[in-house]
Image (spheres, coloured by chain):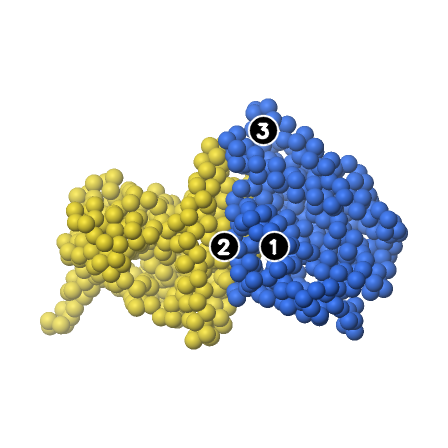
Chain colours: A yellow, B blue
Amino acid sequence: MSVFTDYKKEIMDAAHDEKIRVALLRAIKSYRANINNALKKFPHTIKMAEEVREMKEKTIGDMEKLAQQACEAIEENKGKAYIAKTADDALNIIGGLVGSGKLIVKGKSMTGEEIELREHLEALGNEVYETDLGEFIIQKLGSKPMHILAPAVHVPKEDVARLFSKITGQELPPDIETLVATARNLLREKYFQADIGMSGANVVAADTGTLFHIENEGNIRLATSAPPVYIALVGMEKLVPTLGDAYKVAEVTWRYANYTIPSYVSLVSGPSKTGDIEKVITYGAHGPAEFHVIFMDDGRTDLAKHPILRQALYCLRCGGCLYECPVFAVTAGHFGDKYFAGVGAVWAAMITQNREKAASLAYTCLTCGRCKIRCPMKIDVPEMIVTLRELIATS
Amino acid sequence: MMKKKSKGLIPPGLVYMADNIITKHNILGASKGSGAKWAKGLNLPQKGETIFFAGCGYQYSSALESLMSLIRKMDKSAIGSELPMSLAGFQKKLGLDLAGMYRKVAVRGGDADGQPLRDAVKVLHNLGVEFGYLAEDEPCCGGLLYYIGLQSEFAKNAQEVYNGLKSPGVKRIISIVPSCTYTIRALLPKSVDGYDLEVKHFLEVVLEGIQSRELQFPKEVKVTYHDPCQLARNLGLIEEPRQILRAIKGIELVETDWTKGEWATCCGGGGGFEAVFPELSLVLAVNRTRELLETGAEIIVTHCPGCIMQLKDGLKELKVDDVEVLDLAQIVAMAMGV
């Protein structure tokens, strides 16, 4: 009862928030212009997206096998790899590696959000810095991300200026360049003081154990290479068979995230090493000496068995659907749980297993189907939602 | 009422409508026959190999409009905001007879109902198409049952719908409500073995019929067209309504830059959403109305009873009184002078 009531109040408050409406209106307009431009310039993306969908359909049932294969590849690269069956397993593995009293710099990770990784590490007595600008703002506001790629999509520059003024103790103008420079200054030294760097991954090649990071800010590059230890948390649905497959997934992801090409795409497969002195391989040259990857299942292999709902695992997290959802346009991430909108409803039901929240989200979907038109994976959200409603109504 | 345990997490507004479909064979819970009032005086035979399927949305449009207005008022009030989203049974705790309120409103439906339907019938007759109308025997397609998660009830209803259509000898259906059309064309066959009804949408019949016709709108107007989700994205009828509008002299079709065809924005009334989130649904209606108004059109044309209701509410909320919402059937009727 209270879940519904609280949820409905939350989304209605959001729907009456003029800031959200205006911020989203601008974001949607710019997204559409950018993606049209990106797809016009690189029209092969559409065909490539079809290939990725076919590949996902074929391989999503093999996640465990792929995870095993990726673990072997990473170990061969002298990294350490782990398979976490549940969210708790993942938190325990990472908690064990980190310990307490550490300084951690972190790239934005929805999988991390899913299991509340930052909160867990802080509870263990560590200091954690989110380094993605949007996520940093969200962390400092004590809020939650409102979009998978642009977590602070709903926060206007005036609010950021107020927040950063409070942090720095200086009066800062609502000037975006100044605010970006302030965040850079606040975080710069943390990368080099940090004991541990952390991130997720956009896609992972099982044959080589290679993690792909797609970004524009450069924070993931720094967070994954400056500290002496690097830990990655990866949802098992991110695994694909080969390096070539992974490249396709990456290109489709950034293109539908409205970029012709992102500033940085990093491929990371193991710890930093050198053989430059007497051909003796030594670890920890300029980058981390330790490289840990945790592949998390947490309900994904079960979800892959469902004939309809498994489509949620095809999601590349490009965020395109969110710009097409009429409800999201007025509520932002309030129409969501760990993930947002239609796919978010499936995630809440099947992965985080928050049944009442899942029901709320399932009935918030209009089943209008515009997200499906946008989705590079052609995920049939209305079909999933109707299926989910049946599960909710009959379970 | 249906089995309690099977609907615990379905919002009550939807459970209520589902009950109506199962027990009263219409989404409103209106008494048998009241949905057929619109056809009075049209002298439609009550059977035929080809029938016109009117659908709940148009038949009860004015009742549904007053009902929505009531629900929206309740949703804004302190107690009402809890109601539509609360768990089934909660309304009883509050001592509110929601069903009674729904029915009282239902009775008010009357003269305003069915203008698009009467016009659609006149248009078809003008094109020389012959058909019957089952009137009070027209079954509810039950699509809503499917969309709200009551698939087994839908499947059971599907067989009844099929039998209800087959027993008077129906072979072909001209259907007009987008959602009903999709249900009878695409969803029923999945639940009924040997399903053999031929289903055409009204617009397909009209487009075929007007090929060599002169159509002239009574005045020069700028109109924009709003694609209903089911019509555009499920039935793929995107070009047809536009071809019809372009064929009418006096009408200038002005469209949104981006949100048209398969990219059209939902009016906020999809899949029973308006019954669960009445207030939010109005916010979405306003947003969509704003997009359409940017075209500078004097008439917003669409072709779905749900969209019509939403867009009218959007105009009202925006206090725009020099733009009207009309059904495409009404536009064609005007252009034919029928």
Asked if residue B62 is positioned above or below residue B175 in the image, the reply reads above
User: What whole-number distance in Å separates the C-alpha atoms at marks 3 and 2?
Assistant: 31 Å
B27 lies left or right of A298: right
The residue nearer to you, when weighing B279 against B224, is B224
Q: Name the residue at 86% across, 49% down.
A: B41
Looking at the rendered structure, the secondary structure element under dot 1 is loop
Give amino acid for label 3: Gln
Q: Quadrant of residue A193?
A: bottom left
**Residues packed near mark 1 inside 10 Å, few (<14), some (14 to 19) or many (20 plus):** few
The residue nearer to you, when weighing A206 against B208, is B208
Q: Earlier in the sequence, mark 1 or mark 3?
A: 3
Q: Which residue is mark 2?
A: A325
Give amino acid for label 1: Asp
B331 lies left or right of A243: right
Residue B189: image tag = none
Q: Name the residue at 52% across, 44% down.
A: B280
Question: To which chain does the residue with label 1 belong?
Answer: B
User: What whole-number distance in Å separates the C-alpha atoms at marks 1 and 3?
Assistant: 40 Å
Quarter in which the C terminus of chain A is drawn: top right
Looking at the rendered structure, the secondary structure element under dot 3 is helix
Residue A324 % position (x, y): 49, 58
Give amino acid for label 2: Cys
Specify whether residue B92 is in view.
yes
Camera-nearest label, 1 or 3: 1
Camera-nearest label, 1 or 2: 1
**Residues packed near mark 2 inside 10 Å, few (<14), some (14 to 19) or many (20 plus):** many
Residue B14 % position (x, y): 62, 39
Q: Are marks 1 and 2 on the same chain?
A: no
Asked if residue A326 is positioned above or below residue A7 in the image, the reply reads below
Q: Which residue is mark 1?
A: B322
User: What whole-number distance in Å separates the C-alpha atoms at marks 1 and 2?
Assistant: 29 Å
Q: Which residue is mark 3?
A: B91
